[in-house]
Structure formats: structure tokens, C-alpha cells
């Protein structure tokens, strides 16, 4: 049983990586790919926001280490800014593709001032003051460590500067939360700037994820060496062959649902076909994945493999040079003093209940811990669920109100 899973996983991995390899070498995908896999990504954030009645403005935020990030803004009556931080391989679009039933539009309809950043390397933030993501490998040398350490401070400072507010409310999904724990532990002065952080599908430890995630974790050294050997730096960016094939196969017909959802997607999030129905799932493939560095994926695998929430492992020599220690230093979660509300779900295979409990017991200021009562609620339902209004928002809005006074 385990062996067959390893074989299937390895074959799938090599297939994905082989197709990335074509682009990693700087060659264009061949003509056949261009013709065949020419499905474009869907209408962008600004277009979607206008469609749902909220013209968005756009900001460029430059980080201390030179990355140029795009942040969207849905201006609201409220003086209280809310920032929505997306997860891995994702973008700001994730918060709006459910339209009238999305969190971004629901917040905007209620008058909140909503800010939607994009972390480095994705569809909207694939820019740098010096480095060219298509030519300079150094552009891709970041993980969620740098997202927490450089991107978040720049984004938070910009929101506070633009609004004049002393603090903001943060809502994160998946890796969006991981970055906030890193911020709070490595730059503790930022804890004061967040009045509450609402963590949807909090990710920190990965001790209890089932296969195939646990299989990938067991194969961490292999995955890492494949990325290195094949010189793969960007994973599933919009123009990579693997992302094109996925979009082509999975967005073109509802018939692809059994394969794309059941075989490729749900094993990594938890099964919930009622909330992610075929028509919507097909649309989601035009937005997700939005690209990330291979190092970001490897860092998550390392956390699972080493069973420590620590900085990136460069190997003993690299670690010695960078950290003055053969092993990477763990993040000190006791420094994350911002108020945090943890929302977990029993059918979330990435952010499992026992792992969220491990995290909860190390964070010093958990103000709320909620396990979603819907037993099928999974990792993706927090951003894409058909009935978030029923299953999710009733837990989010009272927390925002409690920490922002009356709106
Ligand atoms: C979004 O799409 C519109 C219409 O195609 C275009 O004018 C605009 O520049 C795009 N914005 C971004 C941020 O890509
Ligand atoms: C993909 O390629 C198109 C056409 O060259 C370009 O306009 C776009 O910015 C690229 N997107 C990404 C995310 O690399
Ligand atoms: C490196 O670590 C050693 C042993 O822990 C310590 O004695 C030394 O002062 C450290 N060096 C620096 C530059 O921090």
C-alpha cells in the first residue's frame, strides 16, 4: 500500500518537474505547447472587483530586499483596515473568485476597508528592482521566511501609512498565517500593529497530515535534490508548462472534474465536492496555481520532515555560515504576542486538528480557537466554499467587530 503510493507520487512528481524543466532551462515551450495549452488565466482582480461593484485601486509596495509587490485595495467607509493574506501558490484573486459570496466582497459590502496583497513571486508580484525572474535565479531564493520577514512589514506599514490607522486586522489563509507567525517572532515590534490575526487553516506543524502529503514529507531529501538537479526555481507560475497543462485540462470541460478534483486537488486539501462543485472548480483552475518558488515548497517539507518549525535548512555548512549553527534556528513562537484566532476544520488534511493544537499550545495570545462544525469543511473551503456565508463568516465577523469597536 505504502509502496504503491510512493511510486504514484514519484511518477506524478517527475511528470510535473519534467514539464517545468522545459522552462527552467530558459527555452520557450515548443510550438505545440503554445498552441495546445493557450488557455489564459481568468479576468484579473481589478476586473472582478468592478464586476461586483467595488472598483479597486492598486498599490506597488517595494520590500527592503527589492521585491515589487502588488496590493489591491477596496476602499471602505470604515477607518479600520483589514488585510487579507493568501496562501501558497495562490494570489489575491482567491479572496474574490466566489464573487458576491466571497470574503473580500462581503467585507467591502459591509463597509470595511479591505487590502489584498500578493506575496513575492506570484502572478502579480513577479518583479524586483534589479533581478529578472526569467533570468536571475536569485529572484527565486526565498521561502515563506522572507514573505514574513520582508513582505509583511512592507505591506503592513504601507496600509497603516495610507489609512492613518494605528493598527489593522489581519486575515490569513494557510501559508498567509505561517508568514504572520514568522513576522511576530522575528520582528516582535510588529505584534503591536496587528489588533487581531484571524488564522483560517493555520499552518505550522505538519506532523499529522495523511498521505499523499506525508509521502511527500518522507521524500523531502529526494524532492529537494530533484529541484536542485533539474534547476527548478519557479513552480507552477502562470507561464510554466505544468500550470498550462493543468489549466488546459481542468478548465476546459466539466468532464475533467473527476480527475482534476478527485485525483489531483482533493487529496491535498480534503474532499468536499458539495462546497467545491464542478462549475466553480473549473473556474478556480484559471486562478490557482499562481506560482511560487520551489524553495517555499521545500521549506514546508523540511518543517514536516525535521518536525521543527525552524528557518530554512541549507545543510550543515550553509547553516553554519548563515546561522552560526549546524541546524537552522527554530522560530520562537512565544514572541508572537499579537491576538490570534485559530479556525480549524476536521477534514483539512494540511492543517490537521492535532497540528493546530500543537501550535495553539505554543502561541501566547490565542483569543479564540474554533473547530468548524461542518465535518466535511476542508482546506480550500475557507476561500472558495460555496456556502462560506453559512459555514465560515459567522465565525469571522464577530471577531473583527470585537477588535475594531463598533463600525
Ligand atoms: C487587469 O485587466 C484589465 C483589463 O484587461 C487591464 O486593463 C489591467 O491593466 C489589468 N490589471 C492588472 C493589475 O493586471
Ligand atoms: C506570461 O507571459 C505573458 C506573455 O509573455 C506575460 O505578459 C505575462 O506577464 C507572463 N506572466 C507570468 C506570471 O509570468
Ligand atoms: C557562534 O557560536 C559560538 C558557539 O555557540 C559562539 O561562541 C560564537 O560567539 C558565535 N559567533 C557569532 C559570530 O555569533
Image: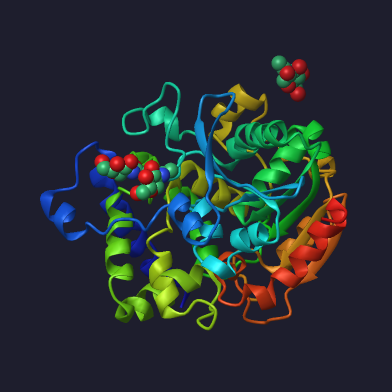
Q: Percent from the top left, x then y, of residue 113?
A: 68, 49
The residue at 46%/40% (across/down) is 121
Q: Percent from the top left, x then y, of residue 206?
A: 64, 59
The residue at 59%/53% (across/down) is 305
Eyeballing the image, is 371 above or below 407?
Answer: below
Whether residue 230 is visible to the viewer of this picture, yes or no, is: no
Whether residue 82 is visible to the viewer of this picture, yes or no, is: yes
- Image quadrant holding the C terminus, namely bottom right
The residue at 30%/48% (across/down) is 239
In the foreground, 225 or 346 = 346
Q: Percent from the top left, x then y, of residue 370?
A: 79, 69
Residue 179 placement, left or right of 14: right
In the foreground, 190 or 100 = 100
In the foreground, 339 or 50 = 50
Residue 19 placement, left or right of 45: left
Residue 192 placement, left or right of 1: right
Eyeballing the image, is 313 above or below 341?
Answer: above
The residue at 70%/30% (across/down) is 161
Amino acid at each position: 500500500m505504502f509502496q504503491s503510493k510512493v511510486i504514484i507520487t514519484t511518477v506524478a512528481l517527475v511528470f510535473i518537474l519534467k514539464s517545468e524543466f522545459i522552462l527552467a532551462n530558459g527555452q520557450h515551450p515548443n510550438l505545440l505547447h503554445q498552441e495546445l495549452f493557450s488557455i489564459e488565466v481568468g479576468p484579473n482582480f481589478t476586473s472582478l472587483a468592478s464586476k461586483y461593484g467595488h472598483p479597486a485601486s492598486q498599490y506597488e509596495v517595494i520590500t527592503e530586499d527589492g521585491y515589487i509587490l502588488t496590493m489591491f485595495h477596496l476602499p471602505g467607509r470604515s477607518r479600520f483596515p483589514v488585510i487579507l493574506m493568501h496562501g501558497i501558490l495562490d494570489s489575491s484573486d482567491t479572496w474574490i473568485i466566489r464573487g458576491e459570496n466571497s470574503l473580500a466582497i462581503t467585507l467591502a459590502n459591509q463597509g470595511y476597508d479591505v487590502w489584498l496583497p500578493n506575496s513575492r513571486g506570484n502572478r502579480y508580484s513577479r518583479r524586483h528592482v534589479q533581478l529578472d525572474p526569467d533570468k536571475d535565479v536569485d529572484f527565486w531564493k526565498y521561502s515563506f521566511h522572507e514573505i514574513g520577514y520582508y513582505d509583511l512589514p512592507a505591506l503592513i506599514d504601507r496600509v497603516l501609512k495610507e489609512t492613518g490607522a494605528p493598527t489593522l486586522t489581519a486575515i490569513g489563509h494557510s501559508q498567509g498565517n505561517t508568514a504572520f507567525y514568522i513576522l511576530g517572532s522575528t520582528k516582535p515590534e510588529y505584534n503591536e500593529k496587528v489588533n487581531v490575526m484571524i488564522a483560517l487553516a493555520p499552518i505550522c506543524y505538519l506532523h499529522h497530515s495523511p498521505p499523499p502529503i506525508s509521502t511527500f514529507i518522507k521524500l523531502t531529501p529526494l524532492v529537494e535534490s530533484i529541484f536542485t538537479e533539474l534547476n527548478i526555481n519557479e513552480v507552477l507560475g502562470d507561464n510554466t508548462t505544468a500550470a498550462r497543462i493543468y489549466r488546459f485540462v481542468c478548465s476546459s470541460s466539466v468532464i475533467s472534474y473527476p480527475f482534476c478534483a478527485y485525483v489531483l486537488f482533493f487529496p491535498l486539501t480534503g474532499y468536499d465536492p458539495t462546497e467545491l462543485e464542478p462549475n466553480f472548480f473549473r473556474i478556480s483552475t484559471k486562478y490557482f496555481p499562481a506560482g511560487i518558488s520551489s524553495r517555499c515548497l521545500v521549506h514546508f517539507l523540511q518543517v514536516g520532515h525535521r518536525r521543527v518549525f525552524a528557518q530554512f535548512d541549507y545543510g550543515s555548512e550553509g547553516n553554519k555560515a548563515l546561522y552560526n549553527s549546524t541546524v537552522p534556528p527554530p522560530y520562537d513562537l512565544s514572541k508572537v504576542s499579537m491576538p490570534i484566532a485559530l479556525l480549524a476544520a476536521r477534514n483539512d488534511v494540511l492543517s490537521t486538528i492535532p497540528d493546530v493544537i500543537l501550535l495553539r499550545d505554543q502561541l501566547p495570545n490565542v483569543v479564540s480557537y474554533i473547530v468548524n462544525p461542518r465535518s466535511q469543511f476542508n482546506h480550500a473551503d475557507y476561500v472558495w466554499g460555496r456556502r462560506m456565508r453559512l459555514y465560515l463568516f459567522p465565525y469571522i465577523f464577530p471577531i473583527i467587530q470585537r477588535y475594531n469597536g463598533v463600525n
